[in-house]
Image (spheres, helix red, strand yellow):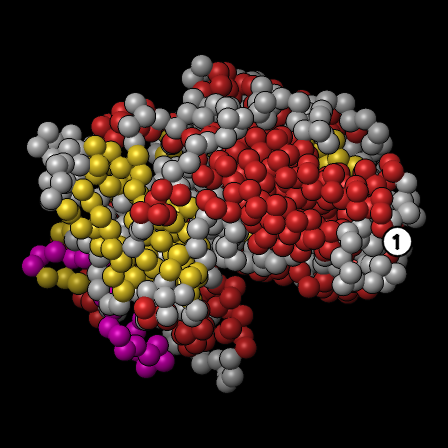
């Protein structure tokens, strides 16, 4: 080994990094993610920690400075304390903390710091954090929207840092010291207000105010949003109404402010008509008229199957009806019935020159095409199209105004003025994009928060039946000035140190102008996210606003897709294998290019979050093992490019309550793979030698993962890292017949050893728990025959009666059934219980977490002492069992317990009093 090991290849303060990353996901104001939406953006804390620990030597690499393990640990602990400060959001621009980090990097790198390259820059978290650490950052991406975002975060703030504003506002001191990008942010806000005033003059009449009822003094108020329901004609000839398709009638569920729509059937017309009123106060609305099974006519009850609704949409016969108006009242939201004036104001012609671009015929997460929405313009109402076209066109007008103002108020040369105006216009265009995200007919109304949801609540374009049309001239969610302020605030506190370099470039191309960079990247996840198809939604408006400024970046009508690395069969005539091969070859080329240019002194770090989702029998037909085409392809590319894995870290990079994960066991972690070039004289191993090494080394790594409280949903994925680290250190692993053992087979063997490890942990449990595991595997929570239960109990050295006494089962009528957590007696004190099992403890902890939260659960954990760790390990085992059985819903409770374990332990350690002594289970 010719290189010195970096900290990330030995140990890092994983728990603190993950805590900071999780917390960061809930921070909004000023966070770079609020500049513009990007999908699966990695937390800054994670990226900052990965970069720092990749650049700083581990103390063990310098025995001349740190001769003993004790001294090395002391030095490592010192670095850990610095990292714990470095990853905090509050310290993102803390000059003292950042300078300490830079000094540590320079200690081993010297004064000439290496450059950092991310060839799949996406949302830009990695290059932005490299820049924050004082390194020359190079962001590359094929997607023009991603390129523009990286320019906005990395290039422009650094280029125009410490400059005063150019606008003619008399309320600021032009001679004052303008730190960072504050001057730039001031101009963004000023010209954003200018755009709003101009837009108000041109289209303000389309957004009328509304008169409030008598209890509000009949005063006029701004409208926040108009709430619409899509409609289709009832197919019943005796009815024929325009049937509303509303998933819900709730307007507000806030306590004391409840409001709901009441549809009223007017039988005086032929066909009947529906009018809407609003009811407030306590009460329940009627059921919606559309759900996952289809729709129902509200008048005659005729079913409206999705096949019919889709055909009506494709024939252009789907309409919409105004259900309610949300106004900004003196003390909060006011919900009002529709008025004829407001219905007519929305009935406008679309602009003649709006983008006429087509949605893909198929795309990941896209559903709207099934209902006749085949063009991007179909995602918006006509009034929304008018507004977005107006604001988009005003970007260039605002730029021209800036140039005129700067020529009057500034002594800058004309070229500099033009470049600065281009920069401000870039941010104003991003504000228009934020407006588009909150102003499409895919936006819904959130009755729990009384606000509009954005278009991309998740990385998809699903059909929305009752949608919310926000008012861009209001002062509430979805308004233009709010979008401007979010953009300005993100820029105001941006990292503005070393100027970054951003280029549109395919990751498989030659990297020009970057010599021996440190590479850290987050490559595409096989077929998880269709970035190009999704970003077209924003591209069409950015192109309209910014094409004169960035003609090369916006030279195509839509985002380039032919070279995008994503395994989507619909781009290859539905051929799954061709799509897989395209992804495999492209990613392999990208890794080969990284291998050629990567700095030899530093590791390559690769983020990957792809759930293992393909189940199949092993080669001997013995049960089910899991493999993943996504993981297989990524790892195959790395290994073929000559890399071996020297470290793996499960990072909590996803928000647990994000929409895509709601109600599912969605992955919460990315695995960061630390890679080095494999030694040219690496040995060859047989399949048996590889499997023996797995069984010898993987259990220790798995225990480390469990001690870090990695969620069970992530354990199988995380185990790939240390398992493939063993596989990749050999030049080849060979089968008995001399052929190479494939990566897919290696993944299956890793999962096999994981199953063995979790099964072996059963030996630590009491007999009742061992019986409960075996019974659960065969019956889950359903009843089984008493005789079978008794026979199994003898094998586990217990009895059904003992399990009844332990409070595990119900045994009546010749049947035995495991008790659910919510069926356990409410009163339970483990310090007074005659006998209790790990199974009981686990259920009690799950029940407490579900009903009372983490603090109460921490108190219970304090009572059960060390047995709590066994209960956590049992939750891992049961989740893995549920995964194999396909019991996704059953597994959620086990996953939730472990996912919350760090916080429960944290609260438990803070509680007063001594831990209660643990009773014996036997």
Quarter occupied by residue 403:
top right
Query: What is the quadrant of the N terminus in the image?
Result: top right
Range of residues picked out in magenta? 813-838
Reply yes or no: does residue 829 show up in magenta. yes
- Decide if residue 600 is on the left or right side of residue 195: right
**Callout 1 secondary element:** helix
**Relative to residue 233, is residue 94 depicted above or below?**
below
Name the residue nearer the viewer: 320 or 920. Answer: 320
Name the residue nearer the viewer: 875 or 584. Answer: 584
> Looking at the picture, how far across and down is residue 817, in whole percent?
19, 57
- Decide if residue 48 is on the left or right side of residue 258: right
Question: Which residue appears farthest toward the bottom when viewing the image?
Answer: 913
**Relative to residue 594, is residue 668 depicted above or below?**
below
Quarter occupied by residue 816:
bottom left
- Decide if residue 263 is on the left or right side of residue 576: left
Q: Label 1 belongs to which residue? A: 107
> Looking at the picture, how far across and down is residue 379, in whole percent?
43, 34
Name the residue rendered at 44%, 51% in the picture. Answer: 208
Name the residue rendered at 41%, 25% in the picture. Answer: 374
> Looking at the picture, how far across and down is residue 46, in whole percent?
65, 51
**Relative to residue 344, is residue 764 depicted above or below?**
below
Asked if residue 575 shows in the view, the reply is: yes
Reply yes or no: does residue 651 show up in magenta. no
Asked if residue 43 shows in the view, the reply is: no
Query: What is the quadrant of the C terminus in the image?
Result: bottom left
Graded by Cα atoms within 10 Å as few (under 14), some (14 to 19) or many (20 or more), the crowding at tag 1 reads few
Name the residue rendered at 39%, 76% in the picture. Answer: 919
Name the residue rendered at 35%, 32% in the picture. Answer: 622
**Relative to residue 623, is residue 814 depicted above or below?**
below
> Looking at the picture, how far across and down is residue 362, in whole percent?
43, 24
């Amino acid at each position: 080994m010719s290189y010195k090991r970096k900290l990330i290849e030995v140990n890092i303060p994983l728990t603190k990094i993950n805590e900071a990353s999780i917390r960061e996901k809930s921070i909004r104001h000023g966070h770079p993610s609020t500049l513009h939406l990007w999908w699966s953006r990695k937390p800054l804390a994670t990226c900052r920690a990965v970069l720092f620990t990749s650049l700083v030597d581990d103390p063990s690499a310098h025995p001349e400075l740190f001769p003993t393990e004790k001294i090395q640990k002391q030095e490592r602990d010192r670095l850990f304390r610095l990292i714990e400060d470095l990853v905090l959001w509050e310290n993102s621009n803390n000059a003292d903390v950042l300078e300490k980090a830079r000094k540590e990097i320079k200690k081993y790198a010297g004064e000439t710091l290496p450059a950092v390259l991310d060839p799949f820059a996406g949302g830009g978290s990695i290059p932005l954090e490299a820049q924050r650490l004082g390194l020359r950052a190079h962001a590359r991406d094929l997607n023009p929207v991603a390129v523009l975002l990286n320019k906005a975060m990395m290039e422009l703030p650094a280029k125009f840092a410490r400059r005063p504003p150019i606008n003619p506002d008399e309320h600021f001191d032009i001679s004052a010291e303008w730190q960072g990008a504050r001057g730039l942010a001031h101009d963004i806000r000023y010209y954003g207000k200018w755009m709003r005033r101009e837009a108000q003059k041109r289209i303000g009449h389309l957004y009328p105010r509304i008169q409030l009822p008598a209890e509000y003094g009949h005063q006029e108020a701004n409208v926040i949003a108009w709430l619409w329901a899509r409609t289709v004609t009832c197919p019943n000839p005796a009815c024929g109404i325009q049937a509303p398709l509303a998933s819900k009638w709730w307007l507000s569920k806030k306590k004391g402010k409840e409001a709901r729509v009441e549809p009223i059937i007017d039988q005086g017309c032929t066909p009947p008509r529906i009018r809407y009123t609003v009811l407030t106060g306590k009460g329940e609305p009627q059921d919606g008229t559309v759900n996952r099974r289809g729709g129902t006519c509200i008048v005659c009850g005729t079913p409206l199957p999705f096949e019919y609704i889709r055909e009506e949409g494709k024939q252009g016969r789907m309409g919409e009806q105004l259900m309610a108006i949300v106004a900004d009242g003196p003390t909060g939201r006011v919900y009002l019935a529709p008025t004829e004036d407001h219905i007519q104001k929305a009935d406008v012609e679309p602009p003649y020159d709006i983008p006429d671009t087509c949605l893909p015929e198929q795309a990941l997460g896209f559903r709207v095409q099934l209902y006749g929405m085949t063009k991007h313009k179909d995602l918006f109402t006509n009034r929304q199209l008018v507004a977005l076209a107006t604001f988009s066109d005003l970007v260039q007008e605002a730029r021209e105004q800036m140039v005129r103002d700067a020529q009057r108020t500034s002594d800058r040369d004309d070229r500099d003025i033009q470049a600065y105006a281009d920069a401000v216009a870039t941010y104003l265009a991003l504000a228009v994009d934020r407006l588009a995200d909150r102003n499409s007919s895919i936006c819904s109304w959130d009755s729990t928060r009384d606000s509009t949801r954005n278009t991309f609540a998740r990385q998809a374009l699903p059909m929305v039946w009752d949608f919310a049309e926000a008012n861009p001239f209001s002062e509430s969610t979805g308004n233009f000035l709010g979008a401007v302020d979010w953009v300005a605030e993100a820029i105001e506190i941006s990292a503005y140190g070393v100027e970054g370099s951003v280029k549109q470039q395919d990751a498989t191309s030659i990297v020009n102008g970057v010599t021996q960079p440190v590479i850290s990247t987050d490559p595409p996840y096989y077929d998880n996210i269709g970035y190009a198809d999704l970003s077209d939604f924003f591209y069409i408006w950015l192109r309209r606003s910014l094409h004169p400024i960035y003609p090369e970046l916006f030279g195509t009508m839509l985002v380039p897709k032919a070279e995008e690395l994503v395994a989507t069969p619909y781009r290859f005539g539905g051929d799954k294998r061709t799509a897989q091969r395209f992804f495999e070859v492209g990613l392999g080329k990208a890794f080969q290019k990284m291998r050629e240019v990567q700095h030899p002194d530093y590791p390559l770090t690769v983020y990957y979050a792809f759930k293992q989702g393909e189940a199949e029998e092993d080669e001997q037909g013995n049960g089910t093992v899991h493999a993943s085409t996504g993981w297989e392809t990524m790892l195959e590319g790395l290994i073929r490019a000559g890399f071996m894995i020297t470290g793996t870290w499960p990072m909590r990079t996803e928000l647990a309550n994000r929409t895509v994960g709601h109600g599912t066991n969605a992955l919460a972690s990315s695995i960061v793979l630390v890679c080095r070039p494999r030694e040219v004289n690496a040995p060859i191993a047989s399949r048996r030698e590889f499997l023996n090494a797995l069984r010898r080394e993987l259990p220790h790594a798995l225990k480390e993962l469990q001690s870090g409280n990695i969620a069970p949903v992530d354990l199988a994925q995380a185990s790939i890292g240390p398992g493939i680290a063993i596989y990749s250190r050999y030049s080849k692993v060979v089968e008995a017949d001399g052929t190479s053992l494939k990566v897919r087979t290696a993944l299956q063997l890793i999962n096999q050893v994981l199953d063995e490890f979790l099964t072996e942990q059963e030996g630590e449990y009491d007999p009742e728990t061992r019986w409960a595991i075996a019974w659960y595997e065969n019956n889950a929570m359903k009843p089984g025959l008493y005789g079978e239960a008794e026979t199994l109990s003898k094998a586990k050295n217990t009895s059904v009666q003992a399990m009844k006494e332990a409070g595990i089962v119900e045994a009546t009528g010749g049947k035995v059934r495991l008790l659910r957590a919510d069926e356990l007696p409410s009163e339970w004190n483990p310090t007074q219980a005659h006998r209790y099992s790990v199974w009981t403890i686990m259920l009690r902890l799950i029940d407490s977490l579900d009903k009372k939260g983490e603090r109460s659960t921490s108190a219970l954990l304090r009572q059960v002492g060390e047995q709590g760790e066994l209960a956590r390990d049992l939750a891992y085992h049961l989740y893995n069992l549920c995964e194999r059985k396909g019991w996704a819903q059953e597994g959620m409770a086990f996953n939730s317990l472990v996912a919350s374990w760090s916080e429960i332990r944290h609260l438990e350690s803070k509680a007063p009093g001594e831990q209660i002594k643990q009773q014996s289970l036997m």
